[in-house]
């Protein structure tokens, strides 16, 4: 079973796309972070003890945290949107 966010999640000038896959009792997911349609990062999570929604929520939080770190790094941060 595959679950993908239908629309990107906008956050601080970045777009976050989340995809979660279930294979038996395992759930894997990743969040892709884009700025101006340019790929910037991928964060991944896997679990046998979580639900699909919990994985999706965790990925959303991790991706937003990554963007927050870039924002703190200032204009010299390589991943900042243009």
Image (cartoon, grey):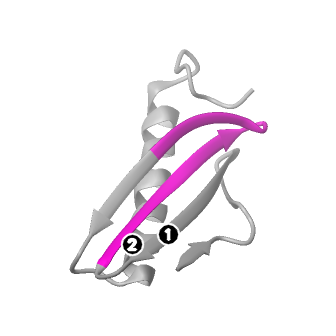
Q: Residue at x 36, y 73 (%)?
A: 27
Residue 64 percent across, percent down from the top left: 49, 54
Drawn side of residue 73 relative to residue 14, left or right? left
Residue 77 percent across, percent down from the top left: 52, 21
Disc 1 is placed on an element classified as strand
Magenta stretch contains residue 29: yes
Q: Which mark is residue 49?
A: none
List the single residue furthest toward the top: 76
Asked if the residues shown at circle 2 and circle 1 are in contact, with their CB atoms under 8 angstroms apart, the answer is yes
Residue 36, image quadrant: top right
**Is the residue marked by circle 2 packed among few (<14), some (14-19), or many (20+) residues within 10 Å?**
many
Mark toward the viewer: 2 or 1? 1
Is 54 rendered above or below residue 31? Answer: below
- Closer to the chain start, of discs 2 and 1, is 1
Q: Residue at x 49, y 33 (%)?
A: 70
Is 32 rendered above or below residue 82? Answer: below
Magenta highlight range: 26-42
Q: Mark 2 — residue?
A: 55
Along the line of sight, which residue is nearer the eye, 10 or 28?
28
Along the line of sight, which residue is nearer the eye, 10 or 71?
10
Quarter of the C terminus within the rendering: top right
Q: Mark 1 — residue?
A: 20
Instruction: State the count of labels.
Output: 2
Is 28 rendered above or below residue 75? Answer: below
Drawn side of residue 78 relative to residue 47, left or right? right
Along the line of sight, which residue is nearer the eye, 6 or 23?
23
Drawn side of residue 23 relative to residue 50, left or right? right
Q: Residue at x 39, y 65 (%)?
A: 28
Residue 55, image quadrant: bottom left
Residue 12 percent across, percent down from the top left: 64, 48
Magenta stretch contains residue 27: yes
Disc 2 is placed on an element classified as helix
């Amino acid at each position: 079973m595959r679950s993908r966010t239908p629309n990107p999640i906008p956050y601080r000038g970045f777009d976050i796309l989340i995809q979660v896959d279930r294979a038996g009792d395992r759930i894997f997911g990743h969040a892709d972070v884009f700025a101006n349609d340019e790929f910037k990062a991928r964060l991944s999570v896997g679990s046998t003890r979580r639900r699909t929604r919990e994985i999706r929520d965790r990925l959303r939080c991790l991706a937003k945290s990554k963007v927050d770190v870039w924002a703190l790094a200032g204009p010299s941060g390589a991943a900042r949107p243009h």
